[in-house]
Amino acid sequence: MKITIKEIAEKAGVSNAAVSLALNNKQGVSEDNRERILQIAKDLGYELLSRTETAEPDITIRFLKISRHGHTLNPSHNYFIDTYVEGITSTAYRNGAVLEIEAYGAGVPLENITNKIINSPQITGYLILGTELNESDVNAFLKTGKKIVFMDTFIDYISADFVDMNNTDAVYKIIRHFTSRGHSRIGLIKSSVNTRNFYLRERAFYQAMNSMNLEINENFIIDVDSTFENAYSDFKNFLSEKPELPSVFFAINDIIAMGCMRALQEAGYSVPDDVSIAAFDNLPMAAMVSPQLTTIEVSKQDIGQTAFDMLLLKCGRKDSPPPRKTQIGGKLIIRDSVKDLM
């Protein structure tokens, strides 16, 4: 069985980033920890390659995690981001590339980040987590003239490289699952927080409903915040009006779904007997709540590995190859939160 960066990190009691630094012989981890991490990796059977065995030892890739508002890039999603990093790290290491990781909070001006990129000629290319980036942000990074691949976002009309989950395909899977269980009164719990993936999932919901000739009831379209506590509070306020409810909701992500489930249960509704719900992301908590949440498993490692491969291709060419936009499908994880009405 293939040993992962996460397994090494758990065994060593350190972060995925610390393992990445140790494997790539970079500063940021003490020598004692470095030696301990390398020994644990070796003991677990992780394939440790020397620099002489790698094809491109002079490539340094920097992964940037950039929070613009913190509504989606917050501690609730650390597992999600760590799995991206794991996919990137293992692929980078096996290609002889050095991976550096930087995180910027919402209070850091975007200009400071782009200026650092411009003034870092030693960095071969950048993998930028675009979860909270808007069109203007993406264009600001492109103006640096550096080799960049954006992850976890998808803007089809911008001439740049993107790797993202296939939101449309995933939402269609969820709506088909609802109809296969006899549901036709379907609602959406969305969020107006500015993320491209939220927008794409909302758009896909309307597309799927229309293509399957399902009625869209605007009273069943609810807008909440994207953090757990605020989603819970917003949905609790909605329920206080004793509204008519659909038989099932699609929530735009797991965190929102779990906040709304809490509000439903506190208001006396049974999930899924009174109201069913499904979501998106398959965070670890999705299997821990009651009932366990039906959701979409995002191919996080594949996204990280694909993004690195695309960047490596760009870095290996003097001329810029045509922009590539890759969407990777997800898997529907069926659990207990959707009732079978058939």
Image: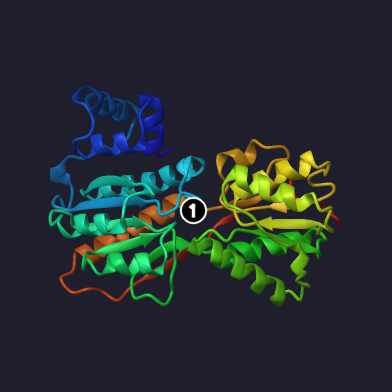
Residue 288 rendering spot, x and y as whole percentages = 64, 35
- Relative to 121, 38 lies left or right: right
Residue 8 rendering spot, x and y as whole percentages = 36, 31
Q: Residue furthest right?
A: 342
Residue position marked by numbered label 1 in the rendering = 299
- Given residues 45 and 260, the one toward you in this image is 260
The reply to whether residue 93 is visible in this rendering is no
Identify which amino acid the numbered label 1 is placed on.
Answer: Ser
- Relative to 144, 10 lies left or right: right
Residue 70 rendering spot, x and y as whole percentages = 46, 49
Query: Residue at the location (25% across, 25% down)?
Result: 33
Determine whether the residue tagged by mark 1 lies in a helix, strand or loop: loop
Question: Label 1 crowding class (10 Å Cα cut-off): few <14, some 14-19, many 20+?
Answer: some
**Image quadrant in which the N terminus is located:** top left
Where 313 falls versus 305 (above or below)?
Answer: below
Q: Number of labelled discs?
A: 1
- Given residues 18 and 299, the one toward you in this image is 18
**Image quadrant in which the C terminus is located:** bottom right
Query: Residue at the location (36% across, 37% down)?
Result: 16
- Given residues 33 and 271, the one toward you in this image is 271
Query: Residue at the location (21% across, 64% down)?
Result: 146
Query: Residue at the location (18% across, 57% down)?
Result: 124
Q: Residue 269 sits in which quadrant?
A: top right
- Given residues 230 and 254, the one toward you in this image is 230
For the rendered model, the colour scheme is: rainbow
- Relative to 175, 229 lies left or right: left
